[in-house]
Structures are given as C-alpha cells and as structure tokens.
C-alpha cells in the first residue's frame, strides 16, 4: 500500500495548476556566481529560483503573455477576495478549515504561492501590492504557528507534510525573502528540516528509501531549503540525492532499473512498484530534474553525474513514446485520469514545458531534437493550444522555439512500440494512434485510493484507446460520464461494481495472469496478447491484438464464465460530446442519430462511425449498438482531499458497440477489425475484399495473415502450429516475407520460458543478421531458437534470406 499525494502537478488550488508550477517552467540557464567574485552564491541562486517561478522581466503588453496573465489574475484575485485576513481567524480560507488538517494547510500554502506569484509578476494585477505582500507574510506566520511546525506529528497523508507543504513554503520564501523576518526564515527552514530533511528517506518511515518522483520532489525541496537558509551542505545533499550517493546509487534517478520504480531501458516508467506512470510520476521526475539542472547550472552544486543521460534518453524513449500531438496518453496516467483539473492536455503541456526546460542544460545534440519535437507537439494541437495552458516562464521559452525558423517542427512519429516493462503498447500511423493498456502479475490493472479513480475497474484489462483528429475525446468529460464497465477493447462480466479507493492511502490490483505484452517487427507491425483472469469473477479469456498499417485486428478466444451473468466484449465506446450526431452505419444501413437507439444486429459484418472509422467483423457478430446520453459529475469518480471533482452534472453522448457472448459462455470468441479514419465505402470494401485473414482464433493460438504485405503474426498460448508457423510453447511471433527477405520477431510476453523455438514453413538460405539471443538453422524449414530467459518480454529479431 502506498500513500502518495494525488495532486502533484496541480498544487495551486486556484484552478490554474500547471500554469504556475515552478518546476514546469523556468528561465534560461545562466551561471551562478561563486563567493570568489564577491557575490553571494545563495543570492544568485535565489534570484534564479524566483525567475524560474515568475519568468523574470517581461513586457506585459506582449500578446503572448495575455492568456497567462489573465489566468494568473483570475486565480489570484479569487484567492485574495476569499482570504480571511482578520486578526481572530482560524483558517485562511473557509473551505480549507480546519487549517490543522494536512490537506488544508498544504493547499493553503499552494494558494499563498498563487498570490505571491501574482505579486512578483510584472503586469499582474497584484504586482508589487504592499498589502498583498504583508498579508502573505502574516499568513505564513499563522500557518507555522497554528498547523505546520516541527512540534507537530505527521497525520493523514504523508505527502502533504513531506512534499506538498514544504515545496510551496520554500517557493514562497524565495519570492518574499526580503520581506520575511530572519527568525521566521529560520523557523520555516526548521520545519522543512523536520519533515523533508533529505531526499533519501521517508521521514515518517526512515527505513523506507525514496524512489522515482518522490526522490526528485524532495531533491528540489532540499535544494531550495539550502538556498533560502544559505546551506551549502543542503545543496550538496539535494544534488547527491538525485544520484543516491548515500546508498551507493541503489535508488539513483540516473540509472535504469531492472524492477520497481524508475526508468527501464525499453522506455517504460513505473512508480509504486507496479503502476505504468510515465505521464504522472514520470512527468514529475522529469520536471524536478529539469528544474534542478536549470537552477544549479554553473554553481558549485551543479549536476555532473554522467548518468543524467538516462533522463536525456527518456525524453524520446519514454515521454515522446506516449505523447500524441501534445496530449499525454491516459494509459500511462494512472489514477490521475480521475482528476478534473489534470486532463491529458494539461499533463502533455507539462511534458512539453519540462522538455524545453531540460533542453536549456542538455548537450545540443539532444536539445536540438527536443526543440523540434516540442514545436511539433505545440503546432499540431490546435484544439487546446499550449499557449493557453502554461505560465509566463514556459511561454518565454516556447516563444523562442516557435519564432525560430531554424527549429523545424518534427513530424508526428509513425511506428510501433512495445513498452514491455509496463505492459503498454503504442501503435502510430499517419493521422492516428492507438494505445493498449494491459496488466499482469507484474503490472497493476489499476491504482486507486485517497478517493481517486473510483471507477478504474477495467482500465488495465485491455482497454484500447484511439487517438485521432478528436483531441478532446478523453478530456471532454469522458472519465466521469463513460460507462466504465464498457471500455473499448475490454471483455467484461456485467456484474455490479462498487467504488474503488474510498479509504485513505492508495492501493493497486495486480491480476494473476502471466501473459501481457507482445512483439514488434520492423518498428512497424506488432502483435500483443493478454490472458484475462477477471477479478471477482470466473471470467477467463485469451485476447490478442494485431497492429497493421491501416488496421488493428482484435481476437478473443476461450471466453468462459460460470457466474450466471452476461459477458460482453466492447468494440467501441466513443465520446460524441454534448450533442454529437455522428452517423452510425451497419451493413450499409444508416442508424438513427439521436439518443435512445438500442439496436441488435445478429450477424453484423461491418459498421462505420462517421468521423471515426470502420469496424469489420470477419465471421459476423452478434453486435449491439447503443446511442445514449450519460450524465455524471467528476465528483462521482474523485473525492480526493485536494483533487475532488466538482459536483456539476455533465451530459455526454456516446456510441457504444459491443459483442454479446450471452450468459455464462463456454469457449466463446470474437474477431473484429478497427479501421481508423476509413469512410463507410472503404469499410464496406475492406469487409468484402478481406485483405487480412484470421488464420487462427482458438485458446491454443491466435493468428492473422496479410498476403499483400507478406505478413503473418501469431500469438501461441501453447505449443502448436498456426498459419504454417510452429512454436514449441507460448510466445508471440511475427514474420514478414518480401523481396527475398524474411524478417522475424519473437517475444515471450508471459516470461515463463527459457527458450522459444520457432519453425518456419518458408525456405531460407542464409542469415543477414540476428540478435545474439537468436540461433538460426537455415534450410527448407528454418528453425530459430530464441533465448528469452531474462529478457523481460522484449522482442528478439532475425533477418533471413
């Protein structure tokens, strides 16, 4: 059980969150003077820290800053108007009472930081207002005397005590340093020393070493504590904590991990030991490291660990892999999907900002590529413009990139990525992408807790996300209003579910299946599989997905349950927004556009949803098609102490397609093809021409063959032969024969074998290349012996001729 604070990127309760977060912004890197030239290095670093928060000197009349200043004024103005400044107050804001509650005093510091940022930002309505500055300093003393001081024992969520409150407090001390009495500065440093003494250990559990984002968070806090308190020792402790010199690098942020929290060589990022968390905790880690690189550059405490190349490589290997046109994919955002004020575009904007900040202190070979990538993200997302999501420091940096003709915007990537170490698969084609969210006994199906992600039941059971021109698909009220028991790609038992995560602390659920993952061939084609062992149900299924140039083929077999309930496989559940009327066509017949349509098609061959794409059912399917309006509130899925959603009722219209397997099915199956972006006519043609053949769909093997590409892909659940390929045990195999070349990719996503032996039915005369783990015997029926032990489900390749 973990007890991590849920709202890392939205500390400022004013609702502008990432607009002002210092770690998500920052100015260019300069050199901190040292004491040898007569300049106090702590003064220099403190000025730099303040500029990282406010952006420094700007011309407020410049149009680029207009939205950010308006957002800052709106947030700060609301907090200023509501703030209790009377002598006998018992809280700073009535909705954050009692102030002694950890969530309340932590959020109070966050709101004060919003005010202080407005006070320190040129062009802001409260800029330089003496009354505001005095009120903030008095409020800091009130919080210290009343709620947050070294004499207080930790209670509730540890994060508020050890990260949330001290971070905002130190940022406040930076901005108001010259106005805070020396004894109060000492008192505020003392409280940080009490609850966040160093980045290495959890204060309330000293035997617990901090890892990943928590270590990075604490490193930034301790660095600011060193700057505010004039402590070289603290600054060294912060720097060295990133590398974990205390424990010999065991928990260094600058090394790849073989298990647990951190970055993996394949690009995966895991936090809380088993949660795919690139978009949330990974983003926090990136932001804190980028911030510290910028803050400490050129000083006596600058980061010199060569292992920082792990972070540099992660920009493309980890973050770009799961970012679509500036949106962070929800498949790697964990319980953050339930946060109303932290949507995919907010997190994506934070990633863009963090990448550009890190670029200021990275080798130019890296930085040049990152600027191009970031420019592409910003320019392609016109639905939710980046410039409306971030604060002034980030805007200054982005403007420099956007206005520089020498920086060419990188095109949207095309390719297939298997992030085996966190059970995620991403497939990208021109104009669209899919993300597949799997789970296993290694990676959690969901994380919930502290009132967050109350309906996350099936998010790791094979949910297939489709990203296309509708960049607000998952941010426009999707998570509170979607039928959470009908997520696209999943096979579910229609049992009644109760809310997850209603208690304190966070928890995860790992299913007992071994198989989750797949293989990639030529960075273009992929196959993935997951054995579904449903929680709280007898439902079992074997599911596979095959990723092609213009299609995703989904197969299911061995679908069995004995609970007396209906089992369904969800093909689509598309958010049509408030009043969408996208036309659904089934087998050439247009269906009613309005809500209330609930139709059954006993032998559907194909369907098409206007503006989304086509769906083909090669063997026919008992298809249900529902057009409904659903009403809910963000508070239905998140009641967290500082992330609770609003009670405002939202209504969204959905088109839901599913295959009904009946009550307590035995050995049921399905086959459908997703054709993103195809129109109805081409979908009908695809259904008739059958360019992809389902070669096998059983509990022993699932396979497809595409003659035009010479591509055959199989997932073997057991030893056997399918589509002419023989495998001696479980494994995923892709083979492409074209132009005299035979490309082969093999993986063991269950991680249960030592060697996987594959026999091909096509002759090969030689080996053009092969991984060290692949031994090839050529001839009329070539044999590949693949050493998969210890490979963590990663792909092994060979090329024959």
Image (cartoon, helix red, strand yellow):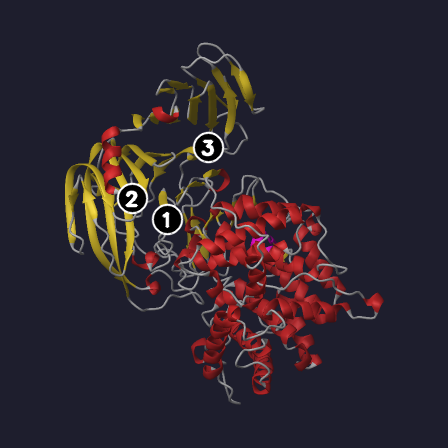
Which of the two labelled residues, at mark 2 and mark 1, occupies the earlier sequence position? 1
Residue identifier under label 3: 520
Which-is-in-front pick, marks 3 and 2? 2
Name the disc covering residue 468, or none: 1
Q: Is residue 170 magenta?
A: no
- In percent of width and height, residue 85 lies at 51, 86
In front of the other: 557 or 679: 679
Residue visible at 51% across and 27% down? Answer: 796
Q: What separation in Å lies between label 2 and label 1 (alpha carbons)?
A: 10 Å
Task: For mark 3, give the secondary structure.
Answer: strand
Mark 2 lies on residue = 613
Measured along the vertical axis of the image, is residue 593 above or below residue 691?
below
Bounds of the magenta segment: 208-215
Q: Alpha-carbon distance for marks 3 and 2?
A: 24 Å
Cβ atoms at labels 2 and 1 below 8 Å apart: yes
Q: Residues within 10 Å of mark 2 (few under 14, many from 20)?
A: some
Relative horizontal placement of residue 169, taking residue 722 as reference (left or right): right
Location of residue 110 with respect to 651 vertically, above or below: below
Image coords of residue 289 (percent x, y): 62, 56
* x and y, in percent, of residue 505 in the image: 46, 58
Nearer the viewer's eye, disc 1 or disc 3?
Answer: 1
Crowding near pointer 3: few (<14 within 10 Å), some, many (20+)? Answer: many
Image vertical order of residue 291 relative to residue 721, above or below: below
Per the image, is 210 magenta?
yes
Marks 3 and 2, the one that precedes in the sequence: 3
Residue 714 as seen in the image, left or right of residue 124: left
How packed mark 1 is, by other alpha carbons closer than 10 Å (few <14, some 14-19, many 20 or more), is many
Residue 561: tell me if it is visible.
Answer: no
């Amino acid at each position: 059980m973990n007890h991590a604070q849920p709202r890392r990127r939205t500390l400022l309760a004013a609702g502008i969150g990432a607009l002002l977060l210092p770690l998500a912004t920052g100015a260019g890197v300069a050199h901190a003077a040292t004491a040898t030239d007569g300049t106090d290095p702590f003064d220099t670093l403190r000025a730099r820290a303040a500029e990282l928060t406010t952006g420094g000197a700007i011309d407020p009349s410049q149009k680029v800053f207009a939205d950010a200043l308006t957002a800052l004024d709106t947030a700060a103005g609301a907090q200023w108007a509501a703030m209790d400044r009377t002598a006998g107050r018992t809280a700073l804001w009535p909705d954050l009472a009692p102030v002694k509650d950890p969530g309340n005093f932590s959020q109070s510091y966050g709101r004060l930081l919003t005010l202080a940022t407005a006070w320190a930002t040129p062009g802001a309505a409260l800029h330089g207002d003496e009354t505001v500055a005095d009120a903030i300093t008095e409020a800091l003393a009130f919080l210290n005397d009343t709620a947050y001081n070294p004499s207080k024992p930790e209670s509730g969520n540890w994060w508020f005590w050890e990260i949330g409150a001290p971070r905002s407090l130190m940022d406040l001390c930076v901005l108001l340093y010259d106005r805070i009495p020396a004894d109060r500065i000492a008192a505020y440093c003392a409280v940080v020393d009490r609850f966040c003494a160093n980045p290495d250990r959890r204060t309330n559990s000293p035997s617990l070493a901090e890892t990943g984002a928590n270590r990075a968070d604490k490193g930034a806090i301790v660095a600011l504590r060193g700057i505010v308190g004039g402590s070289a020792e603290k600054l060294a402790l912060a720097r060295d904590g990133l590398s974990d010199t205390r424990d010999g690098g065991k928990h260094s942020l600058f090394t790849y991990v073989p298990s647990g929290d951190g970055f993996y060589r394949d690009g995966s990022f895991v936090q809380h030991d088993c949660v795919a968390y690139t978009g949330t905790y990974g983003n926090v880690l990136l932001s804190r490291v980028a911030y510290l690189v910028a803050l400490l550059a050129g000083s006596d405490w600058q980061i010199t660990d060569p292992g920082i190349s792990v972070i540099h490589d992660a920009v493309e290997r980890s973050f770009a892999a799961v970012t679509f046109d500036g949106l962070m994919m929800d498949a790697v955002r964990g319980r953050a999907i339930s946060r109303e004020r932290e949507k995919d575009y907010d997190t994506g904007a934070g990633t863009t900002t963090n990448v550009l900040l890190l670029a200021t202190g990275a080798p130019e070979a890296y930085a040049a590529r990152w600027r191009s990538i970031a420019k592409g993200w910003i320019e392609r997302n016109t639905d939710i413009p980046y410039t409306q999501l971030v604060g002034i420091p980030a805007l200054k940096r982005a403007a420099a990139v956007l206005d520089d003709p020498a920086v060419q915007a990188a095109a949207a990537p095309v390719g297939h990525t298997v992030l085996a170490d966190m059970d995620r698969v991403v497939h990208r084609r021109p104009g669209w992408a899919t993300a597949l969210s799997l789970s296993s006994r290694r990676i959690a199906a969901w994380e919930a807790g502290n009132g967050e992600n109350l309906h996350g039941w099936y998010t790791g059971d094979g949910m297939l996300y489709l990203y296309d021109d509708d960049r607000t698909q998952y941010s426009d009220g999707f998570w509170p209003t979607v039928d959470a028991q009908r997520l696209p790609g999943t096979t579910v038992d229609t049992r009644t579910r109760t809310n997850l995560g209603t208690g304190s602390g966070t928890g995860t659920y790992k299913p007992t299946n071994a198989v989750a993952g797949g293989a990639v061939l030529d960075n273009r084609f992929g196959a993935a599989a997951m054995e579904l062992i449903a929680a709280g149900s007898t439902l079992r299924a074997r599911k596979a997905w095959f990723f092609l140039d213009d299609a995703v083929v989904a197969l299911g077999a061995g679908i069995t349950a004995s609970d007396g309930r209906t089992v369904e496989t969800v093909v689509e559940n598309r958010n049509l927004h408030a009043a969408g009327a996208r036309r659904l066509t089934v087998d050439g017949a247009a269906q009613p556009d309005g809500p209330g349509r609930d139709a059954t098609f006993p032998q559907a061959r194909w369907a098409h949803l206007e503006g989304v794409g086509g769906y083909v059912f090669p063997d026919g399917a008992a298809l249900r098609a529902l057009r409904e309006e659903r009403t809910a509130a963000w508070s239905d899925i998140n009641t967290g102490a500082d992330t609770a959603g609003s009670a405002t009722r939202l209504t969204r219209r959905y088109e839901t397609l599913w295959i009904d397997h009946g009550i307590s099915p035995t050995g049921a199956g399905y086959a459908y093809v997703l054709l993103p972006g195809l129109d109805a006519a081409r979908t009908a043609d695809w259904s008739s021409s059958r360019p992809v053949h389902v070669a096998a769909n059983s509990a022993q093997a699932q396979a497809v063959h595409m003659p035009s590409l010479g591509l055959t892909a199989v997932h073997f659940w057991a030893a056997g032969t399918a589509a002419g390929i023989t495998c001696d045990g479980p494994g995923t195999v892709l083979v492409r024969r074209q132009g005299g070349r035979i490309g082969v990719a093999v993986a063991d996503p269950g991680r249960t074998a030592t060697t996987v032996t594959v026999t091909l039915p096509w002759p090969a005369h030689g080996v053009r290349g092969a991984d060290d783990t692949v031994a090839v015997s050529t001839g009329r029926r070539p044999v590949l012996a693949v050493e998969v032990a210890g490979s963590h489900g990663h792909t092994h390749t060979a090329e024959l001729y």
